[in-house]
């Protein structure tokens, strides 16, 4: 895999997301990471799923920053390559948001997209 392909498969997280993930995981006994996965469905074709987990699978890619760990399986990574995971706290509320350059459309809920 060339350097460009590796960069395209990379997922990053902002400092705000890392802080919030570390905070959530530290408050959940036995949990060690946030798993982000892509599933079929949702109003735009695919949707993101967020789960607190205590184990790492063989096909997981781990993204670590400031004491926070995000796990993404190989299949989901294909759809999420180049994305940035962010945590937003504004007048509309608090939420994790994924800025995905592969998505050509998304819906108002922020968790569904199409490519």
Image (cartoon, rainbow, N blue to C red):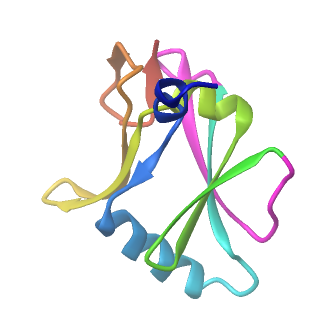
Residue found 30% across the figure and 67% down from its top: 16
**Percent coordinates x, y for residue 29 in the rendering:** 71, 87
Which image quarter: residue 38?
top right
**Percent coordinates x, y for residue 65 in the rendering:** 46, 69
Q: Is residue 3 magenta?
A: no
104 with respect to 55 (left or right): left
Total number of numbered labels?
0
Outermost residue to the front: 2
Answer above or below: position of 87 versus 78: below
**Percent coordinates x, y for residue 57 in the rendering:** 84, 54
Residue found 41% across the figure and 37% down from its top: 83
Outermost residue to the left: 91
18 with respect to 9 (left or right): left
Outermost residue to the right: 58
66 with respect to 68 (left or right): left
Give 53 or 79, whichever is nearer the viewer: 79
Give 67 or 2, whichever is nearer the viewer: 2
User: Magenta segment range?
Assistant: 40-58
Which image quarter: residue 52?
bottom right
Q: Is residue 43 magenta?
A: yes
Answer above or below: position of 97 versus 22: above
């Amino acid at each position: 895999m060339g350097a460009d392909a590796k960069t395209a498969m990379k997922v990053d997280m902002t400092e705000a997301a890392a802080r919030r993930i570390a905070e959530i995981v530290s408050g959940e006994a036995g949990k060690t990471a946030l798993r982000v996965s892509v599933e079929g469905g949702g109003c735009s074709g695919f949707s993101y799923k967020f789960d607190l987990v205590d184990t790492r699978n063989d096909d997981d890619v781990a993204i670590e920053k400031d004491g926070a760990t995000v796990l993404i399986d190989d299949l989901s990574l294909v759809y999420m390559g180049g994305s940035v995971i962010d945590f937003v706290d504004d007048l509309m509320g608090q939420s994790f948001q994924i800025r995905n350059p592969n998505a050509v459309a998304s819906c108002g809920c922020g968790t569904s997209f199409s490519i």
